[in-house]
Image (cartoon, helix red, strand yellow):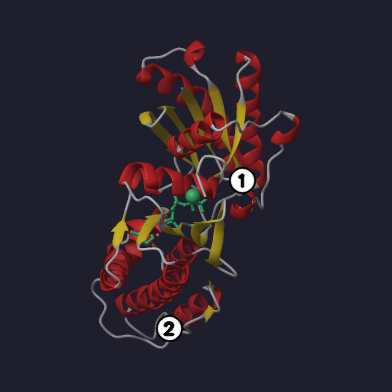
Amino acid sequence: MIVLGLEGTAHTAGVGIVDGEKVLVNISDMYMPVKGGIHPREAANHHAEVFPGLIKRALERAGIGVEDLDGIAFSQGPGLGPCLRTVATVARVLALRLSIPLIGVNHCVAHLEIGRLLTGASDPVLLYVSGGNTQIIAYANGRYRVCGETQDIGIGNMFDKFGREIGLPFPCGPEVERLAKKGKKLLMLPYSVKGMDVAFSGILTAAQSYIGKERIEDIAYSLQEIAFSMLVEVSERALAHLEKDEILLGGGVAQNKRLQEMVRNMITERDGNMYVPPPQYCVDNGAMIAYTGYLMLSSGQTTSVENSVVRQRYRTDEVVVSWRKS
Ligand code: ATP
Ligand code: FE2
């Protein structure tokens, strides 16, 4: 079964094609804001411009024609309205023209499924850390449950905002990581874990107030140490509560080596394993949408055009996980 997947919840326009569990292609084109943060309308225009070319290239690289496709999957949410609407429009046109099923995919669930496919994790707790999202997700009773999440901004967003203030190029996460390696003094920053949730805007404000007063390397170091400790604490509680022993990382921030080290220390103490997908599958990508679309389609889930309206706040636990046995 061959499914083409379109991703476009935020910066990235991605196209992936899978044949069952085999990823045939995964290509993308990222919108780069000229100045400042992401502008949803501009990102959507970018996606509209690049999708036709990306789809053509993806089919060529897979060595197939449109007539070989069995379904069109697209990122239905959560994400930025204008971006989501652009992707949905492209997906509807393709599905209607080709008279094949349309499958609306939840972006967060897709991060988890591609991770399971590529790393061999079977029933992990997912620590999903990207620009816009920070969630701890695990399977229980037929759904992927959000065990904990950010109450304000995503962790990647925090690094980007901090970085922008000190003039780092976007995306700032990798630069903050580089600076943090040279830091050694742990500055006081608010550690905010509330139950199973975390919050980052307080830490960001506190870190910004150190700019000009402390070494930038020490601020970056402290920012990472405190924010990652919070994530490790909440992830560990989810693992203990659900009696799971695998932790899967996903999202752009998952590439951070210090985060990986801290998570690895925690899971090793619990006699469990950590899994990290290859970088191009950690960040937003079309293959994860195509693969989750394949799982949905093969378990009988499709999306009618009437139900294909985009869902900016699409919750992870709204998805009925029909492809997994309870
Ligand atoms: P979404 O939130 O919809 O998943 P996104 O486009 O913000 O989308 P990703 O592409 O998954 O997310 O990740 C981008 C984010 O990851 C940026 O905020 C970037 O700064 C951060 N990031 C990338 N590499 C690192 C790193 N090594 N350390 C910390 N943060 C990083
Ligand atoms: Fe994402």
- At x 37%, y 50%, the residue is 122
Badge count: 2
**Residue on which disc 2 sits:** 210
**Residue on which disc 1 sits:** 320
Q: Is residue 3 left or right of residue 102?
A: left
Name the one closer to the observer, 190 or 303: 303
Residue 169 visible in the shown view:
no
Query: Dot 2 lies on which element?
Result: helix
Q: Position of residue 287 (x, y in %)?
A: 43, 35
Name the one closer to the observer, 124 or 128: 124
Name the one closer to the observer, 247 or 242: 242
Residue 152 drawn above or below residue 315? below
Whole-angstrom CA distance, mark 2 to mark 1, is: 46 Å
Q: Position of residue 222 (x, y in %)?
A: 36, 79
- At label 1, counting other C-alpha atoms closer than 10 Å, the crowd grade (few under 14, some 14-19, many 20 or more) is some
- At x 45%, y 61%, the residue is 156
Q: Amino acid at mark 1?
A: Val
Q: Amino acid at mark 2?
A: Tyr
Query: Dot 1 lies on which element?
Result: loop
Q: Residue furthest front?
A: 326
- Of mark 2 and mark 1, the one earlier in the sequence is 2
- At x 27%, y 62%, the residue is 257
Residue 75, labelled with which disc?
none
Task: Indicate the quadrant where residue 73 lies.
Answer: top right
Q: Position of residue 54 (x, y in %)?
A: 46, 26
Residue 279 drawn above or below residue 176? above
Residue 110 drawn above or below residue 37? above
- At label 2, counting other C-alpha atoms closer than 10 Å, the crowd grade (few under 14, some 14-19, many 20 or more) is some
